[in-house]
Amino acid sequence: MQTIEQTMKETAQKTWNKRPLVISGPCSAETEEQVLQTAQRLAATGKVDMLRAGIWKPRTKPGMFEGVGVKGLPWLLQAKKITGLPTTVEVATGKQVEDALNFDVDVLWIGARTTVNPFSVQEVADALRGVDVPVLIKNPINPDLELWSGAMERVARAGIKQIGLIHRGFSSYGNTEFRNAPMWHLAIEMKRRNPDIMIINDPSHICGSREKLMDVAQKAIDLDFDGLMIESHIDPDKAWSDAKQQVTPERLAEMIGAIKWRHESAEEIEFITALEKLREQINHLDDELIQLLGQRMKIADKIGEYKKNNNVTILQTSRWNQILERAFSKGEAIGLSREFITKYFDAVHMESINHQNKIMNS
């Protein structure tokens, strides 16, 4: 006769193999009541396969809520017993691995701030030796696929057979639309390199707010991701961490129900992912161009102030000719026509003049 623990372990294994896999739960475990209520309401939707909660919260700055620590693990264990949902938590040290496993956490994940540091990943990997537990690895904060791949290799060398990836977006200079720029082309490249590895999407950390969760989740499914990790809280606005990106269990169920779970052929999926990779590269470069143009205009404003204070005219023909000749030389070397360079820099020059004109006449 099977024990309860054996039954739970079998359930967790079946859940790990499920596609699509939906993981949800609060950003942070705050109180026992909050964890249990969230778990029960998520289970009641019938849309969630695994319960997540932050026990240790590595924050960007000190003084922010950094998790309740080990005392939250019994809450998760109790939630699993009540709902039957397997559990998953983030670990960043060998001690955290040990503590999580002592409370029968079913799946561990390595966070973005840990993935970026090979020393930390190695410490976690060393603690996993001889352990049979699935491990998910989030992409590093910065857009570096070698760090992501390296973390996978370290965990695999520790003897872990079941490894998955979480795409949660990347910190990006010039990014204004998302908390973490999706850079879909990088996730797609990881899928190409590791076709047999599960990769799920984390819209919560990509968006940083509720408004675009659905759009990002749908896009991930359209790109043939294996599932989603979305944060859910019984009272999102009062959450102790990342309140803006969490939704209620009921709203989560609505989102999951509204997603179009497509079943394209392999050829169609390959076409979509290849095209999306190129489009995302353009989007990323456009974001950087806009950010750089904004910085250029700030310098133009300073020049306008200087000209105003020194009674100098806005248009300096010789300087403009120097800019154009320099642009022609550099542009032609990389295949840009003189006609394009002229039109582009004329537009930039006029915007710069407009900025300076406002300052000169203010």
Image (spheres, rainbow, N blue to C red):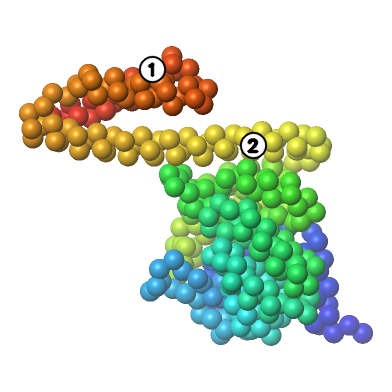
> Residue at horizontal 71%, vertical 69%?
155
For label 2, count other residues whose C-alpha is less than 10 Å away and answer few (under 14), some (14-19) or many (20+).
some
Residue 299 placement (x, y as % from top left) = 26, 38
The CA span between labels 2 and 1 is 31 Å
> Residue at horizontal 67%, vertical 58%?
149
Residue 154 placement (x, y as % from top left) = 70, 68
> Residue at horizontal 7%, vertical 28%?
311
Under mark 1, the amino acid is Thr
Residue 296, above or below 5: above
Instruction: Using the image as rendered, state which of residue 276 and residue 263 is in the foreground.
Output: 276
Relative to residue 337, is residue 297 drawn left or right? Answer: left
Disc 1 target residue: 342
Secondary element under disc 1, as helix, strand or loop, is helix
Disc 2 target residue: 276
Mark number displayed over residue 259: none
> Residue at horizontal 27%, vertical 22%?
320
